Every structure is written in structure tokens, then in C-alpha cells.
Image (cartoon, rainbow, N blue to C red):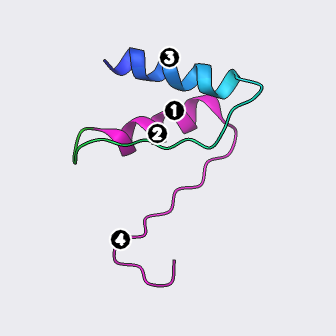
Amino acid sequence: MYRQAIENLKQWKDSPHRKPLLVTGIRQCGKTYLLKKFGEEYFDDVAYFYFEGNSRL
């Protein structure tokens, strides 16, 4: 499953007409882990914002 998700994200990244990405799913299924790993491997810069418990964000 992990490899298929990464392949889907790579296709999204390489698309010339890509739109903003929205990842949905049940709690604790690996969405954050997947996107953080993808960002580290396929982008030069990654920004991660965790809004839970931080009212300034």
C-alpha cells in the first residue's frame, strides 16, 4: 500500500496541471507519515505545520 500511495503522489507532483493536494482518511492510518516522507524525498524544501494545540497558527 505504501508504494502505491507514493506512486500516486509522484504522479500528482509530476502533473503539469496539478491542483492543491487534499489527503483524507481515518485517524492514525499514516497520512502524516506518508506526506512527511514524500516531502523529504521528492522536494528540496518542506514546511510542516501542526495546528493542534497551537493557537498562534
Which residues, given as a range, are shown in magenta? 30-57
User: Which residue position holds label 1?
Assistant: 38
Badge 3, how many Cα within 10 Å: few under 14, some, many 20+? few
Mark 1 touches mark 3? (CB < 8 Å): no
**SS type, badge 3:** helix
Q: Which mark is residue 7?
A: 3
Query: Residue at left 46%, top 35%?
Result: 37
* Separation (CA) of disc 3 from disc 4: 29 Å
Name the kind of residue labelled 2 in the image.
Leu
Height in image: 48 above or below 52?
Answer: above
Badge 4, how many Cα within 10 Å: few under 14, some, many 20+? few
User: Which residue position holds label 2?
Assistant: 35
Q: Position of residue 40 (x, y in %)?
A: 56, 37
Query: Residue at left 51%, top 32%?
Result: 38
Name the kind of residue labelled 4 in the image.
Glu
* Separation (CA) of disc 2 from disc 4: 17 Å
Mark 2 touches mark 1? (CB < 8 Å): yes
Name the kind of residue labelled 1 in the image.
Phe
Q: Residue furthest bottom?
A: 56
